[in-house]
Amino acid sequence: EDSESGVYMRFMRSHKCYDIVPTSSKLVVFDTTLQVKKAFFALVANGVRAAPLWESKKQSFVGMLTITDFINILHRYYKSPMVQIYELEEHKIETWRELYLQETFKPLVNISPDASLFDAVYSLIKNKIHRLPVIDPISGNALYILTHKRILKFLQLFMSDMPKPAFMKQNLDVLGIGTYHNIAFIHPDTPIIKALNVFVERRVSALPVVDESGKVVDIYSKFDEY
C-alpha cells in the first residue's frame, strides 16, 4: 500500500479499541426483563441512542436496544387493529424482542478491547451496523460503544501529525461520498408518521426538511422523535 494513501489504514491497525475508550463515560445497560417504556425513557433521559441488553438467565449480553427499534415498532403497528401501542410499551424487552423484532433479530455483534480499530471499522461495515459494543472477553463487562463518528473523532485528534493523502484534497462528489440522486426528504408539514415511514423504508438516520422552493430549512433525525 502506498505510504501516503495507506496512512489512515496503518493508524487504525496500530491502535486498539481500548485506546478510544474514555477514562470516564456514560454507558447505559438494560436487563431484558425491564419494561420497554422504562427503557426508552431511560435512553432519552440519559441522552444516549442505544444500550446493550443483558440477559440474566444466560449471564451475557444478547443484543442492543436502539431508537431505531422503537421507530420500527411504531411503523409496524401504527395502524394495526390488533395491537395498541400502549400494550407494546408495557411489555418487557425480552417479550418485545421475541414477538416484534423477529425480522431484524440478529446475534449481538461485539468486539474485544484488544482488537484493532481497523477490525472495528471492518465489523461496522461488514455487519451494516452503526454501533459496536466493546466487551471485555475475560470479565464480560461492556466498556464502551464504538460508532463511526467516535472512531473518526479519534482519528481527527492525530490527523495534523500525519501526512495528507492526495484524496483528501479532492471533493466529495469526485470521491463518490454522499447521496446525490433519489434523495429522501420531507417537508415542514409532513406528518411524523410519514417521516417514520421514510426512515424505515429508506434506511436513513436523518432527513433534510425542504420547503416549497426546494430550500433545505432543517434536518430531522431519528433522535428528534424523542
Image: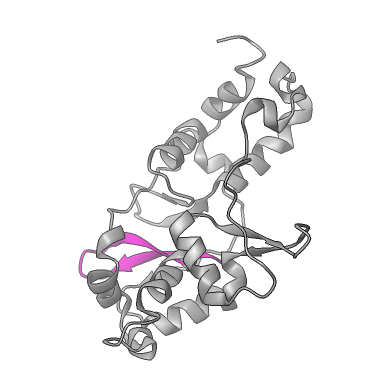
Find out whether residue 57 is within the magenta segment: yes
Query: Is residue 191 depicted above or below 202 in this figure?
Result: below
- Which of 134/165 is in front? 165
Q: Does the magenta stretch include residue 103?
A: no
Dividing the image into 4 quarters, which one contains the N terminus? top right
Return the x and y of residue 137 as percentages of the image width and height: 34, 47
Closer-to-camera residue (101/139)? 101
Which residue is pictured at 63% across the width and 64% down the height?
Answer: 186
Horizontal relation, residue 113 to residue 44: left or right: left
* One can see residue 181 in this view: yes
The quadrant in which residue 12 appears is: top right
Q: Nearer the viewer, residue 166 or 160?
A: 166
Q: What stretch is highlighted in magenta?
A: 48-66
Residue 76: horizontal and vertical position, in percent? 36, 73
- Residue ID at (67%, 14%): 4
Q: In this view, does 52 lie to the left or right of 155?
A: left
| Quadrant location, the C terminus | bottom right
